[in-house]
Amino acid sequence: MAYTVGDLVAEFLAAAGVNTAFGIVSIHNIPILDAIGRRNAIRFVPARGEMGGGHMADAYARVSGGLGVLVTSTGPGAANAVPALVEARFAGAPLLHITGQTATRFLGRDTGAVHDIPTQGEMLAAACKSVHRIRVAEEAFGALLAAAADALSAPTGPVTVEIPTDLQRAAVARPAALDRLVLPLRPAPAPAEAELDAAAELLAGAKRPMLWLGNGAKGAGREALALLDLGFGAVTSWNGRGTVPEDHPRSFGALHGNDAPAIQAFYETVDAMLVVGSRLRGHETLDGTLKLPRTLLQVDVDPRASGRTYPSAHFIAGDAAAVLGSLARRLRGRIAVEDGFGADLARTRAEAAEAYRRTLGPYADFPAQLRRAMPRDAVWVRDATVAGATWAHRLMPVYGPRASVHPVGAGIGPGLPFGIGAALAAGPQSHKTVMLAGDGGFAMNMTELWTAAQERAEVCVIVMNDGIYAAIGHIQDAFQDGRRYFGELRHPDLLGLAALAGMPAWRVDRADAFGETVARALATAGPTLVEVDMRAIGPVPAYGPYAKRQAT
């Protein structure tokens, strides 16, 4: 039997450390998936839609720390994957998208071949770091090598490889390099010694210094803790959560100041802030209006990040762990943090958390109930929903850099497939993955319940069900004089839906029963569903600027 490009793809993925891939079998990828099936070295998870499969691959990459893989058809199948590729680009998730292409004799000719989009690469290029098209069989190994390395090289992100169907079946010589495969990852820029010296000089005189840790700092937890040991405080972006455990006494966790007046006031007392691997996104900085300390230093692997959102007094291009480790060594014995700084930070966090909790109405105790029900090592996944942006983000501590997944692009719908991908990445060593979504977001990918059931994913699905797009309603109340057009939703009975998928399910209609119900679901093997009947418990209060606007 001839060794084909399809065989090469399957062997390459396994040699690159991939053990799970996601997607949908189609006319334009059968040779690749046939090779994956014959080799039986990679678990292939058949999603119910390419968008869902892409979100699964994204979450798998975020939780595993490795390469997420999505296999789709060309044309409509590739187009269906675009929302997931866009989200992976927002999140910086290393995702390798392998898609088919029309046969080489039809490429770019617009002949009406099945599924053919002559400019498919341009569509995918808008969502990806790069797009690679294989035009002859002999290019396949080099293109795969370049694509996987690009996805995994910082700043990480999604990359597509297009492989025409006829080339997938074409015979090719097996590359000997597969026996000793090493991906040619681009090294992060080495921080310049003079820049490190200058940053240390600025920080050495600080009495109340802080770190702001983003997604680019997730691999630098140990080095960040070394600076906390020297007296620094810490706060994280939403995508940097768990870089240091959020029960650390010198951490604000995700209480970064947006809608937390006590923390905004605290920042006015901070005399230096070191921002590491973060875009300082609008969600976290009130679209750039959050006042941060004037002495703001920045560390990022991408030199283009310098001054992109906030002006920085000093910028260092380099790997977060290398820079923070070097700064910790330079500052040891030189920095003298104010004695009461740590106590002030802890007191401010407690005050801010309690003030925020009081804004949650009947859901004020939900974060405490849920955290008690969840094992410490559980993976915490949220969709974009009111709960996901309020208590589920800010008052639910996470303890590891791979234990938190949410839609960084703020689009609704990824939650359920995120939960499945995260659960498969966490594997048997994790007690459970817990996923929270609103009913509107859940509806967008609810067919993936059958993927969860088929794969026996250890995920507890929590659906906050109020029958409306609540966040949109709050915006309409604030800006459209309460005219709530087109936001009401009719859904199937969720417990009945879970029963059709063969999943145990529970309904919560009392606020004080939330935690115990989730605990019961977590104690049940396989996927489970918990519906929170918000119409019985009460409406969720408006949050952030919408609550303030209504109050005036």
Image (cartoon, rainbow, N blue to C red):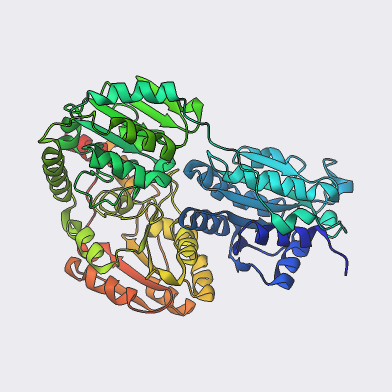
What is the quadrant of residue 324 in the picture?
Answer: top left
In percent of width and height, residue 420 lies at: 48, 64
Residue 370, above or below 351: below
In percent of width and height, residue 468 lies at: 35, 55
Residue 402 visible in rendering: yes
Residue in the picture at 44% in, 62% down: 419
Residue 537, above or below 285: below
Q: Nearer the viewer, residue 15 or 336?
A: 336
- The single residue placed furthest to the front in the displayed view is 333
Residue in the picture at 29% in, 54% down: 392
**Quarter of the figure with the N terminus:** bottom right
Residue 436, above or below 259: below
Residue 116 visible in rendering: no
In percent of width and height, residue 256 lies at: 26, 39
Residue in the picture at 47% in, 53% down: 62
What is the quadrant of residue 329 in the picture?
Answer: top left
**Quarter of the figure with the C terminus:** top left
What is the tally of numbered marks visible in this picture?
Answer: 0
In the rendered structure, the answer to whether residue 34 lies left or right of residue 43 reads right
In the rendered structure, the answer to whether residue 503 lies left or right of residue 265 reads right
In the rendered structure, the answer to whether residue 219 lies left or right of residue 261 reads right
In the rendered structure, the answer to whether residue 166 lies left or right of residue 77 reads right
In percent of width and height, residue 549 lies at: 22, 35
Q: Nearer the viewer, residue 161 or 244?
A: 244
